[in-house]
Amino acid sequence: MSDGGGRFITIEGIEGAGKSSNLEYARGLLEGMGKQVLVTREPGGTPLGEEIRGLLLGHRHTGMAQEAELLLMFAARAEHLARKIRPALDAGTWVLCDRFTDASYAYQGGGRGIEWQRINTLEKWLQGEFRPDLTLLLDLPVALGLERAGTRSAPDRFERETEQFFTQVRNGYLKLAKREPERIRIIDAARPLPEVQEQIRAAIQSSVA
Ligand code: Z5A
């Protein structure tokens, strides 16, 4: 939430959950309601953040320490918040972000095994009380997500992880949703695309629009 009238909506999910497909739908929906919308992503969203993204997703640093991975995610996020997200919200723009801090809890916490308390320390330092107004969690069985994602070529450093890793990530997301059911809406992403979009429309309209 910001003072300027913009709203911050994030979209999350495991590999192949359909975030990209549904972000554009959400953008169209909001623009149809007359909102000015900025679509962005994490890690990334700024020139520095996109460079950090290259380090994180590429294969030059395959065995990177998990703490380094977490801190790079937050370094990119610090820049993103300062240069893009907060200024847009303050100007009244609605921000739609492909992943945000919940992904750090799910991937670096659930997937890698870093204690959530440590992630929470970084979140508090960087964000204070700032949280998304709404998070759409696209949830689906890991095997289905990997099957859908498998149609793409050249897997990045995360996409090479095991089914076990993505199961831990999924469980992390579901735990977050259980803790914050008002903010994090679970979308059944295993359904056909029009049904997924209908769930997204309902969540946005009942929550923030
Ligand atoms: N990461 C992290 O570890 N910690 C953090 O704090 C942050 C991120 C912020 C980059 O994310 C990596 O960073 C990510 C976590 C980590 N790694 N992983 N995994 P990313 O978001 O850029 O990467 P991604 O997860 O691979 O997202 P993606 O490439 O955008 O995939 P997607 O959006 O989930 O899926 P999609 O491309 O929209 O859909 C996949 C396919 O399924 C495609 O062919 C669609 O047409 C199809 N699809 C989609 N929906 C449906 C339905 N409903 N039915 C049938 N087929 C469908």
Image (cartoon, rainbow, N blue to C red):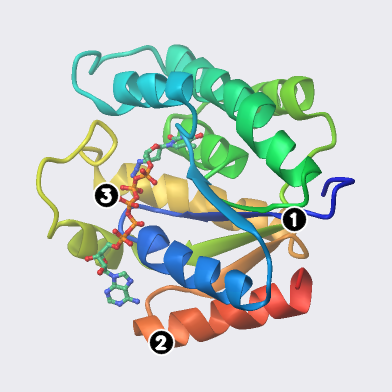
Q: Distance between the Cα atoms at labels 3 and 1? A: 34 Å
Residue 20 makes an appearance in the image = yes
Q: Name the quadrant containing residue 195.
A: bottom left
Q: Quadrant of the C terminus?
A: bottom right
Residue 114: image x %, image y %? 53, 25
| Other-residue count near label 2 (Cα within 10 Å), few / some / many at <14 / 14–19 / ≥20 | few
Residue 177: image x %, image y %? 65, 58
Mark 2 or 1, nearer chain start? 1
| Relative vertical location of residue 29 with respect to residue 57 in this rendering, above or below | below
Name the front one of labels 3 and 1: 1
- Which residue position holds label 2? 194
Looking at the picture, tell me which residue is in the foreground, 55 or 168: 55
- Cβ of mark 2 under 8 Å from ligand 1: the answer is no
Residue at image coords 34%, 42%: 165
> Given the image, on which type of amino acid does mark 3 rest?
Glu
Residue 183: image x %, image y %? 74, 60
- Which residue position holds label 3? 163
| Relative vertical location of residue 5 with respect to residue 74 in this rendering, above or below | below
Left or right, 170 with respect to 203, comes to: left
Mark 2 or 3, nearer chain start? 3
- Which residue position holds label 1? 7
Q: Distance between the Cα atoms at labels 2 and 3? A: 27 Å
